[in-house]
Image (spheres, rainbow, N blue to C red):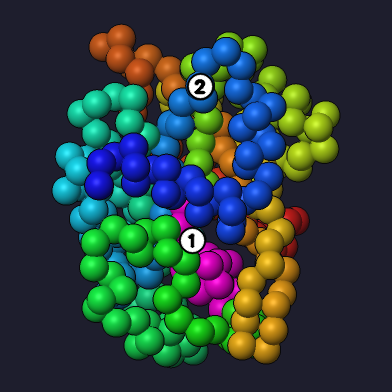
């Protein structure tokens, strides 16, 4: 497995299962040059056998290195980002829900899900784009969503990229994040307005925006339901004091990007 192959598999899963609109957006934005993927994001629970380090291991084996650490106190999340010495390879942003900070009810549901995982399912890197490794009832999903939209998303979808990110720096037809937003809104795509349609500023060296998550079919024990899936992000990076493009992430902006998958869009 090489880096490109792994990201191809992640993209195929993302496009097929989590965010079918991504292919349309990809084709709308792609001009003469191929789109550059700035980063992907993965979600999990801070619990054996699927903690953040387990998801990071396949990337570390491919030469990725640890970047920054991030805390999202209100959402009870911690995250790390990883980057490759080859600058054109996408960064990887992995977050996890701190279960010990959640209710006993939420912890109990998550334990029931994780008990269904076998060690064989986590061997290699296929699980990263393998979807859900457990059975889940829609009642459990709804219970989780009342406390944590993030927990409900992971429970419903399992493993896979919740978003890919177009590097606005490499686009030929647009130079600003706000231009991408307007273009897509004119094509009837909803943009995440939480914290403003453009999150971040040149002063923090990163501007970001995203679509609201696609609504996708998910199979639950009781039958199929339509729930929030994945979304597409757009990022523009600025040069730091050393003249290098900033490679990290901004907690205040990422906090609002998480809400692209919220079921309650008023938040």
Of residue 196 and residue 162, the one placed in the foreground of this image is 162
Disc 1: which residue: 74
List the residue tagged with mark 2.
34
Q: Residue shown at 23%/68% (left/top)?
A: 123
Quadrant of the rendered structure where residue 27 is?
A: top right
Spatial CA span between label 2 and label 1: 37 Å
Apparent side of residue 10 relative to residue 219 in the rendered image (left or right): left
Instruction: Give residue 116's position: percent from left, percent from top.
Output: 38, 86
Kind of element beneath mark 2? loop
Write the residue at 42% across / 76% down.
133
Task: State the extent of the magenta-drawn residues as a range.
Answer: 144-161
The x and y percentages for residue 227 are 68, 67
Quadrant location, the C terminus: bottom right
Of residues 135 and 239, the one nearer the viewer is 135
The answer to if 160 sits in the magenta stretch is: yes
Q: Is residue 120 among the parts visible in the rendering?
A: yes
Q: Could you tell me which secondary element the residue under label 1 belongs to?
A: loop
């Amino acid at each position: 497995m090489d880096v490109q192959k792994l990201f191809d598999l992640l993209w195929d899963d993302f496009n097929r299962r989590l965010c079918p609109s991504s292919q349309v957006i990809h084709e709308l934005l792609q001009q003469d040059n191929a789109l550059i993927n700035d980063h992907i994001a993965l979600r999990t629970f801070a619990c054996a056998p699927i903690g953040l380090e387990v998801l990071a291991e396949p990337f570390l084996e491919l030469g990725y290195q640890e970047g920054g650490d991030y805390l999202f106190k209100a959402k009870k999340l911690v995250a790390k980002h990883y980057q490759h010495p080859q600058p054109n390879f996408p960064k990887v942003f992995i977050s996890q829900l701190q279960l010990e900070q959640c209710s006993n009810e939420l912890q109990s549901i998550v334990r029931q899900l994780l008990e269904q995982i076998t060690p064989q399912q986590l061997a290699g890197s296929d699980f990263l784009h393998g979807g859900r490794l457990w059975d889940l009832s829609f009642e459990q999903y709804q219970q989780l969503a009342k406390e944590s939209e993030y927990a409900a998303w992971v429970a419903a979808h399992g493993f896979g990229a919740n978003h890919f990110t177009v590097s606005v720096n490499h686009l030929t037809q647009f130079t600003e994040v706000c231009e991408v937003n307007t273009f897509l809104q004119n094509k009837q795509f909803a943009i995440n307005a939480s914290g403003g349609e453009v999150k971040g500023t040149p002063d923090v060296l990163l501007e970001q925006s995203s679509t609201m998550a696609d609504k996708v079919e998910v199979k639950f024990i009781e039958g199929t339901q339509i729930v929030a899936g994945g979304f597409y992000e757009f990022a523009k990076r600025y040069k730091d004091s050393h003249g290098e493009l900033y490679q990290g992430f901004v907690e205040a902006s990422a906090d609002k990007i998480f809400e692209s998958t919220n079921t309650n869009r008023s938040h």
